[in-house]
Image (cartoon, rainbow, N blue to C red):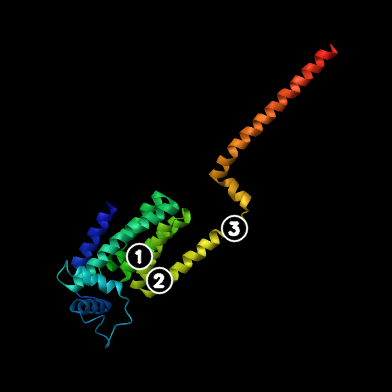
Amino acid sequence: MLLLAALILRLWWLQSFTAVIENEGTEYARIAENLLKGDGYVGKRNEGPQLMFPPLYPFLIAAFSFLVAELDLAGRTVSVLFGTLLVAVIFFIAERIHGRRIAWIAAGLAAFHPWMIGMSAAVYSESTYLTLVMAGVYWALCSLETPSLRRAALSGACFGFAYLTRPEAFIFPFVVVFFVVAINRRALARPVTPACSSARSPSWRLHTLPSSRLTRDICASKARARSTIRSGSGCSRA
């Protein structure tokens, strides 16, 4: 329900307050137009390939242009889509850290904040970038809680796509690695001997189960023998 409200607000803002394309949006739209024409990754601000604007957002605009007629509307559609998904990602992050009640509050702020609404309807890459970064943070948290190659790969993929949207995202994988080492430094520093590691494994317990039973049988036999000897010595004295 909250996602639907966030989507309606962003579509309303797109319809009411986006008469003119933004400054950077013109460059993104021109790059997408040249990509569709087969002229390469070329904008309008300089001759030759455009090296200042990362490629993911223009490629998304070019892809969504097959669904809508105009390139600026395609760019706004991409921003609306990712801006709405950002609400869900923030909810999941807050729920994992602070619980469901705080998650609803955080998601509500993301859904109804005027700046978030405005950026989600603009031809800027910030909406796409923030969603990808927060998705990478979410999967990194999941990987820290329950280590998994799939979760780590999803986190890395999200950060990689964020880097293709804005280059400053290159720092986030290093931040995640730092926190992984910081959180697990005691476990990494503690030596694990083969005996301890084997003792913790289920296979060790299965291998020692017959020997433990044998030990109990031997102890029981000795106890019976001792009792027999004691009873025999008592009879001889009598």
Q: Amino acid at mark 3?
A: Arg
**Which residue is disc 3 drawn over?**
186
| Rendered image: mark on residue 7 | none
Secondary element under disc 1, as helix, strand or loop, is helix
| CB under 8 Å between discs 2 and 1 | yes
| Distance between the alpha carbons at the discs numbered 3 and 2 | 29 Å
Q: Position of residue 126 (x, y in %)?
A: 32, 70
| Rendered image: mark on residue 169 | 2
Q: Amino acid at mark 2?
A: Ala
- Residue appearing at x 55%, y 58% in the figure: 184
Q: In this rendering, is residue 125 above or below 6?
A: below
In the shown orientation, is residue 20 left or right of residue 167? left
- Residue appearing at x 19%, y 73% in the figure: 71
Residue most extreme to the left: 69
Q: Residues within 10 Å of mark 3 (few under 14, many from 20)?
A: few
29 and 55: which is toward the camera? 55
Task: Name the mark nearer the viewer: 3 or 1.
Answer: 3
